[in-house]
Amino acid sequence: MEKENIFKWKHYQPDIIVLTVRWYLRYNLSLRDLVEMMEERGLSLAHTTIMRWVHQYGPELNERIRKYLKSTNDSWRVDETYIKIKGEKMYLYRAIDSEGNTIDFYLSRKRDAKAAKCFLKKALASCHATKPRSITADGDKAYPVAIRELKEEKCIPHSMPLRVKKYLNNIIEQDHRFIKKRIRNMLGLKSLQTATKMIAGI
């Protein structure tokens, strides 16, 4: 079966759309920055057009490239931070490996064992993630509960240790700073669904 052309009926060439979406999600650029950069290349784009592209194509492009991502290693670091979406505090759970490669993320209105478990199950199902030999977390009491339940459900081996070592988690805490800085420059984080789509592309 022929794949659907996701760029059908678009006025601009697909490579222009992909490049613009990638630049916005990957680098610390505002929509106005991108409008100016495109003008220098002879293209007249409205910032609202770029935002529509990001919302429409960001999740699609993320989905298509995930299977080509480098496999992570088996030493996981997990942590959570908070971001504000339309004035409401949300918790951003993230997992990376010991080399700083992103495994997955999860947005939640709550910071508890249920949210931690949902996050870990999502990370375990990630197609490019190597199953963890160990998981390192901060002192959040939700993780031991979540991991115990996942072991009981045979999602992870009973022998896998949960390490609580603050200094080993510095790498993900530094990574949080980049993500939060990027999110501050983003417009359009009006809902949990929109924020999830945007963060998936970063």
Image: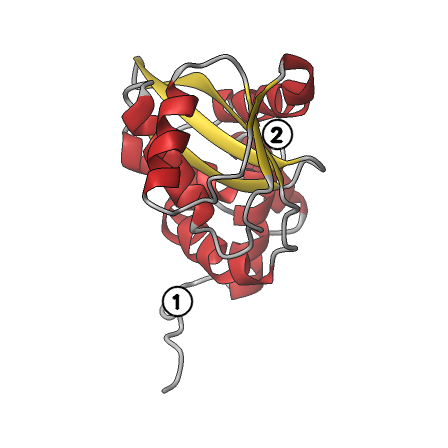
Identify which residue is drawn at 42% across, 66% down: 7
Of residues 177 and 49, the one drawn nearer to the viewer in this rendering:
177
For numbered disc 1, what is the local secondary structure? loop
- Measured Cα–Cα span from mark 2 to mark 1: 26 Å
Q: Quadrant of the C terminus?
A: top right
Q: Amino acid at mark 1?
A: Ile
Is residue 192 left or right of 123 when viewed as pictured? Answer: left
Name the disc covering residue 123, or none.
Answer: none
Of residues 73 and 191, the one drawn nearer to the viewer in this rendering:
73
Image coordinates of residue 123 in percent, x first then y, are 45, 43
Q: Quadrant of the N terminus?
A: bottom left
Name the disc covering residue 6, or none.
Answer: 1
Query: Residue 108: in sight, yes or no?
Result: no
For numbered disc 2, what is the local secondary structure? loop
Cβ atoms under marks 2 and 1 closer than 8 Å: no
Query: Residue 6: in sight, yes or no?
Result: yes
Identify which residue is drawn at 67% across, 18% down: 170
Q: Residues within 10 Å of mark 2 (few under 14, many from 20)?
A: some
Identify which residue is drawn at 49% across, 20% down: 184
Report the residue marked by disc 2.
Answer: 28
Quarter of the figure with residue 39 = top right
Q: Single out the residue that lies furthest toward the front.
A: 159
Image coordinates of residue 33 in percent, x first then y, are 59, 32
Rendered image coloring scheme? secondary structure
User: Is 10 situated above or below 62?
Assistant: below
